[in-house]
Image (cartoon, rainbow, N blue to C red):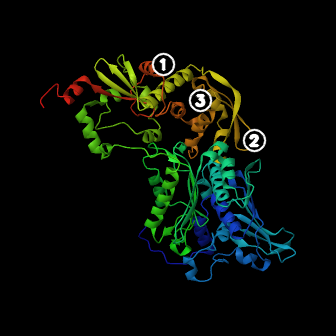
Amino acid sequence: MYNLRMPIRLLSSEVSSQIAAGEVVERPASVVKELVENALDAGAKNIFISIADAGKTLIEVADDGHGIPANELELAAARHATSKLVQSEDLFHIQTLGFRGEALASIGSVSQMTITARVESAKEGARIKVEGGISGKVEKVGAPLGATVRVENLFYNVPARLKFLKTDVTEKRAIDALVTRYALAYPQVRFKLTDGKQITLQTAGDGDRRAILAALYGVDVAKQMLEVMAQEDYGLSIAGFISPTSLTRSNRKELTFFINGRWVQEISLNSALLQAYHTLLMVGRYPLTVLFLDIPAEDVDVNVHPTKAEVRFKQQDKIFSFVQRSVRKALLAYTPVPTVSPQLWGTRSQTESAQREIGIDWSIAHDAELTIDNPPLSAEAAQTSSSSVTQQETLPRVGLPLLRLIGQIGATYLVAEGPDGLYLIDQHAAHERVLFEKLMAQRENKNIPAQALLTPEIVTLPPQSAKALVAQLELLQRFGFEVEEFGGNAFQVRAMPALFSGADPATALRALVEDFEEDETPLAAEVEAKIAARVCKRMAVKGGQTLTKEEQSALTRDLEACQAPRTCPHGRPTMIHLSVDSLEKQFGRKGSR
């Protein structure tokens, strides 16, 4: 059938419009992005966004910008019509967020769109309706200064596109995340986002970015964020906030960059940021960052992607170095530099070779089939495996020999003596395993004791996290948490599992939601062991935490009693073993020299 020749013909305007719209309007959040950027380009000081049915039924963006004259309203809805470009040279000196002249036309071709606008010099406004790419007549109406774009029944004429949209929860999160970022980038603009039932986001527009951070992440997180501010003589400047090394997330979603007021997703910037944190964070942990770069317009090309989310730099190495140095400088102003012995640096093969030389017995640290040539999954890799946690519990129990505790070194490892050598125990991984088995045993017996807090803890989450949590309150109750909505994005923690008595309720709550924000499967449908493992990871004692003799002994005894004491729930070893035989070889007491 592919060998049949068909005549070349021009596509109809309807088909070409829908093809173009597919490049610009991928999902409801794409519509919100284009309309918010238009409002910002129009100089708006107030932007109000309303959505219904996750944006599929309704998206309305109203602003108080300079508006659109009545005689230009029909042209505004036409393709390739814009007030922001005149000649091709302007493409290399973009000063506005929008410039292609495709947004309104693309939106109008896949929805029922109404534009109402009034300019300051006009006594009355004008309105035009666009349905499936076909514009109606311009009508005179009463209207406030600015513009209101109402988009109804998105993708009504391309139902196949509706099937490719994700769940309502996911689409709402995408909109929440988008508006949140623009609120941070433009703190002098008042944003209000509502889904028809409640106000999801509202900012004061007073220019205080830290206040917006507090509204989004809570006062405690906002207080911890470190301010970054730097500039170079050749026109580069950076401002914003980064998190200290003690405040991290398990994914890269909170790495936010704006270039000249435009939200971008640029791999090189993420790499520069993570390089600045090099050696300061645990593997698999990522910072929270909101950074705003100002770069001479001629040094950045924003015309490389229809959604304008990707950019290209004229001098990428210079930008990379500037971001890395600026962030590192801010970090070191608050964080001491860790010292690492040069002998510990090297490749993976060198490390493995050294392990063989000193005689580390990996058979006690891992299950029998996991050897040094086939190491266990890393914590990050194990988290991405849907069966990494549950598979461990099906293995037969392989206990530990009776251990005699010697002490703690580096406030991170316990040293114990066994009948066949020395054992180094990672206190965090060991406690994680102990908590996990206790919690799962209580869960299996349907008896997780809850302990009421003397003073309920108020926890504020980002909008997308708050929505994920609301749908899972029943599940939390089964795990011993008593959590209630407290208005807006705030929650009141009234009780938590007695197993975690004395732990920070906010930390426990965030541990339950942060890794599931992008998951299409609801939290309740996840393997419960996986959820328990995530909470226990956060609640376990940390490396660098000094333990009393009694706490060290208790942890060692509890680990000995575990069904699977060799690894934490994510597959990382809890201990390594140095046999007496290997020690004798190292000291020249046994074998040839």
Q: As shown in the figure, which amino acid type bears the numbered disc 3?
A: Ala
Front in this rendered view, residue 275 or 157 = 275
Q: Residue 531: in sight, yes or no?
A: no
Residue carrying label 1: 550
Front in this rendered view, residue 481 or 429 = 429
Q: For label 3, count other residues whose C-alpha is less than 10 Å away and answer few (under 14), some (14-19) or many (20+).
A: some
Residue carrying label 3: 503
Q: Indicate whether 165 appears above or below 100.
A: above
Front in this rendered view, residue 557 or 583 = 583
Q: Earlier in the sequence, mark 3 or mark 2?
A: 2
Residue 288, x across and y down, in percent: 56, 49
Q: As shown in the figure, which amino acid type bears the numbered disc 2?
A: Gly
Q: Indicate whether 92 appears above or below 469.
A: below
User: Going by the image, does 475 lie left or right of 408?
Assistant: right
Residue 113, x across and y down, in percent: 73, 65
Residue carrying label 2: 487
Q: Are marks 2 and 1 in contact (CB under 8 Å)?
A: no
* SS label for mark 3: loop
Q: Nearer the viewer, mark 2 or mark 1?
A: 1
| Outermost left residue | 592
Write the residue at 44% across / 27% down: 430
Residue 422, x across and y down, in percent: 31, 24
Write the residue at 53% across / 42% down: 246
Q: Nearer the viewer, mark 1 or mark 3?
A: 1
- CA–CA distance in space, label 1 to label 3: 19 Å
